[in-house]
Image (spheres, grey):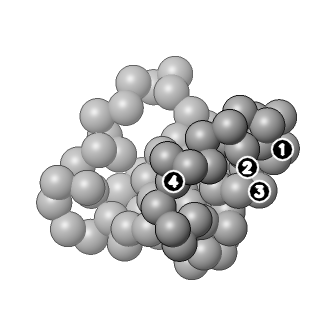
Amino acid sequence: GFVGTSLVVSPANSLVSRAPPSTRRIVINNEPVGTELGLEYGAAGRDSFIGGACEESFLELTARLGWLEGLVTQRDALPAAS
């Protein structure tokens, strides 16, 4: 996945092409980026976009994947802002 990046600057933008064709790619950012690098968002493609603040988006994704309980057990190891 690509998190909080415009995918304009190297080396972050080179990661798009390094993922094997069978790999799902997720961009978590304030707005969709990377279409000029070949990212194609939508149900038919392998690329997904989650919009919004990274921390909030990851928390929602963690909950949807059923991993929230495991995250709670790591609470003391997380930075204070988390």
Distance (Cα) linking label 4 and label 1: 20 Å
- Reading the image, the residue beneath label 2 is 61
Going by the picture, which residue comes out furthest to the left? 10
| Residue at 38% in and 68% down | 5
State the image coordinates of residue 32 (x, y, percent, origin top left).
55, 70
- Callout 1 secondary element: helix
- Callout 4 secondary element: loop
- Callout 3 secondary element: helix
- Reading the image, the residue beneath label 4 is 78
Distance (Cα) linking label 1 and label 2: 5 Å
Contact (CB < 8 A) between labels 3 and 4? no
76 displayed left or right of 37: right
Contact (CB < 8 A) between labels 3 and 1? yes
Distance (Cα) linking label 3 and label 2: 4 Å
Contact (CB < 8 A) between labels 1 and 2? yes
- Reading the image, the residue beneath label 3 is 60
- Callout 2 secondary element: helix
* Rendering quarter of residue 56: bottom right
Mark nearer the N terminus (4 vs 2): 2
Q: Alpha-carbon neighbours of circle 3 within 10 Å: few (<14), some, or many (≥20)? A: some
Label 4 vs label 2, nearer the camera: 4
Mark nearer the N terminus (4 vs 1): 1
State the image coordinates of residue 65 (x, y, percent, origin top left).
79, 36
